[in-house]
Amino acid sequence: MRRVLVAGNWKMNGSKAANVDLITGLKAGLGDIGDTEVAVCPPFIYLSSVAEMLDGTGAAWGSQNIAVPESGAYTGETSGSMLNDFGCTYAIVGHSERRALYGETDQLVAEKYAAAHRAGIQPILCVGETLEEREGGITTEVVARQLDAVLSLEGVESLNEAVIAYEPVWAIGTGKTATGDQAQEVHAFIRSKVAEQSADVAKGVRILYGGSVKGANAAELFAMEDIDGGLIGGASLDAAEFLKICSAGS
Ligand code: PGA
């Protein structure tokens, strides 16, 4: 059985005071969400303070990005070993905002995925198509290309220590969620792609859905056979809403 994972992607949001409120709110409800695994991914500057606040709660934390090199003259970058120093569990790689706004290519995303692994951190590999690509009928082609970049660099077995997040770009921050059936179709495709190389890995790998997940639509999505949780943006900034999503996974 794959354990449901609900991960909050805070993006570039938060402040010292807001984070205390949010984590305090989360901590108050974490005992009532059943078996769902919970993780939060705050901006880098808040990672260590959030990690301290989460200590002992069972909730994990992750970064929103990771550098490819291990150390050295890379101004502004944060490496996997630095993240590991603080007990980081996950690193989001290939989020569509990074692909679109910071020019991250499939190859660079694959290298970041590899960097996370080298540091003992599980990458959360984001894949997904734009509206134009969906309307052009090339959703599976795009997702396959994004996945293949990682599989050819790191091999299918690497997915034993990774999470995939299917995030249709048209559903991110737009309020337009994919329906359960729309999402399931792509999730099943992703799992079948992995199964072409290893049935065992395909059975075990968690595939999260992301894109306007809310308390009100999480249960429908998480009930789908190949949806193993969610990567949550906007709704992860509201403790009550995020906990509702977490509960939908139990
Ligand atoms: P959203 O973002 O939930 O605000 O749509 C999801 C994501 O970008 O990971």
Image: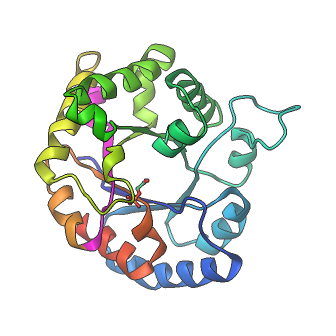
Residue extending farthest left: 181
Residue 140: x and y, percent? 24, 27
Q: Residue at x 88, y 32 (%)?
A: 73
Residue 61: x and y, percent? 56, 58
Tell me if 78 is positioned left or right of 37 in this view.
right
Tell me if 144 is positioned left or right of 17 in this view.
left
Tell me if 124 is positioned left or right of 200 in this view.
right
Residue 85 falls within the magenta-colored stretch? no
State whether residue 43 appears in this view.
Answer: yes
Q: How many marks?
A: 0
Q: Nearer the viewer, residue 158 or 125?
A: 125
Q: Quadrant for ligand 1?
A: bottom left
Q: Nearer the viewer, residue 113 or 217?
A: 217
In the picture shown, does residue 210 fall above or below 158? below
Q: Nearer the viewer, residue 6 or 86?
A: 6
Q: Residue at x 21, y 66 (%)?
A: 217
Q: Nearer the viewer, residue 95 or 194?
A: 95
Residue 209: x and y, percent? 30, 50
Q: Quadrant of residue 137?
A: top left
Q: Quadrant of residue 218?
A: bottom left
In the picture shown, does residue 10 fall above or below 247? above
Q: Which residues are magenta?
A: 200-215
